[in-house]
Image: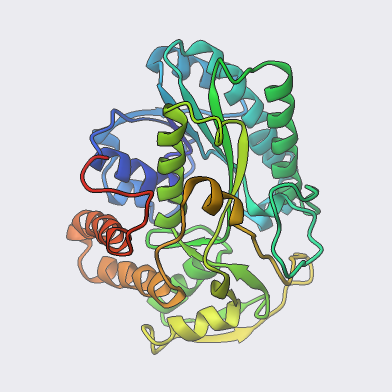
């Protein structure tokens, strides 16, 4: 079961699981971007698809009870910072209460063995620390989105302490850095904003040009979710009830301007100007320390910064010129990512369905 399966990351996770031969059920609200990656890839006919509100316990529990999943990937969220300022109540209901509803719903699946909870790298109290945030650092988001995700983490820890035991379920938390890749058309995100302006030959307005973020290709965290899920299914105590930062290599913490400069190598006619939005307060530096997942599981990212940007932009360029074949192109991006991981002899990935 994937919650939030129609979102950007949720769609890529759904596609990868389909390729692995999994029986997939998706639960998500009716909100979709325009265009929508989920609809473009026509995944609805390949899975069990449910529309519902994660903040409504009856709706999510009904799906868990009927599908009886062996593993749950919880991605459902209101993930846009600007939207969280506009509607903080919806943001907290979705991100905080929704997480509690999902955990409570787990009791309705007798076959459930593992749960991978996806929160955010924004949960940490942001003091712009250069060493990168570690999993045991203080959690305290200042903006509505970050605060709602911090609350979700508190809820998870409460639930683990008060209601669950390691003998009953295997569960872990993941906090991923800034994810980019093909098929994201969300509002007020740098890559979607770039593509929207580029496709219409308009000027891009950049609100925080010097902000530094841990950029990573979408298949990096998706691959880590799958890997952690496979470990949880084997009842590995080193992973169970643990939290993990998922981020890029240390040299991939780049500013927004650095990102745009690399993008312009592929989109030469892209034009931009700085237009700061004083209403939206964002951290200048956000960096993750991913030593824990490297040490415990052997997981490490595959792509360099240039490869990350290249595969992201190439997906959009292909989409605008070959929409009818974008499903196969997306599948090939996953296959190429796996091949690259195998060439680098990553211990967490093997051939075939393993």
The reply, left or right, for residue 121 in relation to residue 108 is: right
State whether residue 349 is above or below residue 343: above
Residue 156 on image: x %, y %: 68, 30
Residue 337, image quadrant: bottom left
Residue 287 on image: x %, y %: 66, 65
The type of colouring in the image is rainbow
Q: Is residue 6 visible?
A: no
Q: Residue at x 48, y 38 (%)?
A: 4
Residue 238 on image: x %, y %: 56, 35
State whether residue 218 is above or below residue 352: below
State whether residue 243 is above or below residue 129: above
The reply, left or right, for residue 333 in relation to residue 262 is: left
The reply, left or right, for residue 50 in relation to residue 343 is: right
Q: Residue at x 63, y 49 (%)?
A: 120
State whether residue 3 is above or below residue 291: above
Residue nearest the viewer, comparing 266 with 37: 266
Residue 76, image quadrant: top right
Q: Residue at x 52, y 22 (%)?
A: 60
Residue 250, image quadrant: bottom right
Quadrant including the C terminus: top left
Residue 87 on image: x %, y %: 71, 46
Q: Residue at x 55, y 13 (%)?
A: 107
Count of number-bearing discs? 0
Quadrant including the N terminus: top left
Q: Is residue 114 visible?
A: yes
The reply, left or right, for residue 340 in relation to residue 122 is: left
């Amino acid at each position: 079961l994937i919650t939030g399966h129609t979102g950007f990351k949720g769609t890529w996770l759904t596609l990868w699981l389909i390729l692995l031969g999994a029986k997939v059920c998706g639960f998500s609200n009716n909100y979709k971007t325009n265009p929508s990656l989920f609809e473009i890839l026509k995944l609805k006919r390949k899975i069990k698809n449910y529309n519902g509100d994660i903040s409504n316990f009856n709706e999510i529990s009904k799906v868990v009870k009927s599908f009886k999943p062996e593993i749950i990937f919880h991605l459902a969220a209101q993930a846009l910072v600007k939207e969280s300022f506009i509607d903080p109540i919806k943001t907290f209901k979705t991100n905080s209460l929704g997480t509690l509803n999902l955990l409570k719903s787990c009791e309705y699946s007798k076959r459930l063995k593992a749960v991978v909870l996806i929160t955010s790298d924004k949960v940490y109290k942001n003091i712009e620390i250069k060493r990168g945030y570690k999993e045991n650092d203080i959690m305290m988001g200042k903006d509505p989105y970050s605060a709602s995700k911090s609350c979700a983490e508190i809820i998870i820890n409460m639930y683990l302490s008060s209601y669950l035991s390691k003998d009953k379920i295997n569960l872990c938390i993941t906090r991923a850095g800034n994810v980019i890749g093909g098929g994201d058309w969300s509002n007020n995100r740098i890559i979607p904003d770039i593509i929207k302006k580029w496709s219409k030959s308009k000027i891009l307005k950049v609100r925080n040009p010097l902000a530094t973020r841990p950029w990573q290709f979408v298949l990096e965290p998706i691959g880590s979710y799958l890997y952690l899920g496979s470990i949880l299914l084997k009842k590995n105590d080193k992973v169970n009830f643990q939290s993990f930062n998922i981020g890029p290599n240390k040299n991939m913490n780049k500013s927004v301007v650095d990102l745009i400069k690399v993008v312009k190598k592929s989109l030469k006619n892209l034009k931009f100007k700085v237009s700061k939005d004083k209403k939206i307060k964002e951290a200048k530096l956000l960096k993750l320390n991913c030593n824990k997942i490297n040490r415990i599981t052997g997981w490490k990212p595959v792509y360099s910064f240039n490869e990350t940007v290249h595969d992201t932009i190439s997906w959009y360029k292909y989409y605008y010129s070959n929409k009818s074949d974008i499903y196969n192109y997306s599948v090939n991006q996953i296959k190429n990512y796996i091949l690259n991981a195998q060439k680098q002899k990553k211990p967490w990935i093997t051939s075939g369905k393993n």
